[in-house]
Image (cartoon, rainbow, N blue to C red):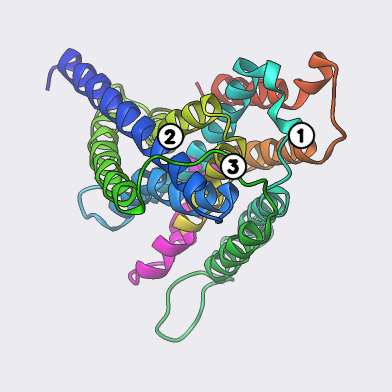
Amino acid sequence: MDLFLMFAQYFLLAFVVIYATSKLSFFVDELDKKTNISGALIGGVLLATITSMPEFITSITATMSSQVNDPGLAFGNVFGSNIFNISILAVADIIFVKEMFFNKVKTQRKTNALVILMYLIFMIPLFISKFSSGDYSTFTVGFFLTFNIISLLIVIVYFLSIRAMGQDETEQSEEESSYSFKKIGIYFGLWATVVIASSFFVTLVANNLGNELGLGSSFAGAIFLGIATSLPEFTAVITLMKLKNYEAALGNIVGSNIFNLTIISVVDIINVNEDLFDTLLVGKEARENISLLLILGLFNSIMLMIALLRKKSTNIYIYLIPSVSILIGYFVYIGLSV
């Protein structure tokens, strides 16, 4: 297929994703006004699950399709999307710096701490492989199960994160929605379907572009595909920030990141033919790139934790240090990978 036509398809689908997600985010805000459910939980579970569907579909395809069969692409897509997601939050923080929204939110601290824990868990097999003399099956569950014990730990942490988001105390919106529950549900379902469908096709085009441009699978997953699958998160954050629903915006990013990390574990568990971590660890190039992604993802989550835990900052330059650090880390990764 002509490269120009592929780019045209990519940008057209990207526009559909952005428009549909902006509509979806609007009805998430309306749902927040209509219910007593916290914006952190709505953004962190409901919206995050939908905006993370592209990563889930792509990871399933990358590992279980005989035509692709490339675990490196799945790992690169998920970890790359997480890095881009945090970068989205950093960019939004800079754009809306007058709001200093990190000074106003009190949620996602426990959940982000669990994201940090997930990164540390994912690092365990990579660390052990350095001293295992090529034996990568140390953590594989026995009997008829081929998934890694790391996957089980990650799934457990994910359910703990849902509980943590449900316990977050948030300020209820004083505004009232003009829509009924029925209308919100119908419109939410409609735009969610459009988001998932358009995101699926844009990831296919992005993958083809990566192949056409000759990018390595894990790098293509982290940059080209990672950006494509993060378009819903980008639009959702910008839309919710405009609506001043900071808790839902933050919840969407943190919730998407923890859901993305869980995707790897879910794919590993349902892929009964092999241990996903084994196939990753035996490839030196993929292993090195994923290690770099994990380190940067951990760094970004720590920077976010600093922004959430510190005392309220009135100095704009000091306030922006975490967000600027996150963006610097992202561009350093691109520089090291090119």
Expressed as whole percent of the image width and height from the top left, the position of residue 165 reads: 62, 57
Q: CA distance from mark 3 to mark 1?
A: 23 Å
Of badges 3 and 1, nearer the viewer stands: 3
Looking at the rendered structure, the secondary structure element under dot 3 is: loop
Q: Who is closer to the viewer here, 319 or 217?
A: 319
Q: Position of residue 13 (x, y in %)?
A: 24, 27
How crowded is the residue under tag 1: few (<14 C-alpha within 10 Å), some, or many (20+)?
many
Q: Specify the amino acid type for callout 3.
A: Ser
Report the residue marked by disc 1: 307
| Whole-number angstrom distance, CA of label 2 to CA of label 3 | 27 Å
The residue sitting at 48% across, 38% down in the picture is: 81
Upstream in sequence: badge 3 or badge 1 = 3
Range covered by the magenta-colored residues: 265-291
Crowding near the residue tagged with mark 3, few <14, some 14–19, many ≥20 C-alpha atoms within 10 Å: some
User: What's the CA distance linking mark 1 and mark 2?
Assistant: 22 Å
Name the residue carrying label 3. 173
Q: Which residue is mark 2?
A: 230
Q: Amino acid at mark 1?
A: Ala
- Front one among 107 and 233: 107
Inspect this view and state whether residue 196 appears.
yes
Residue under the image location 33 percent in, 70 percent down: 273
- In the rendered image, the quadrant that contains the N terminus is top left
Note whether residue 210 is visible: no
Please tell me whether residue 109 is drawn above or below residue 87 in the rendered image: below
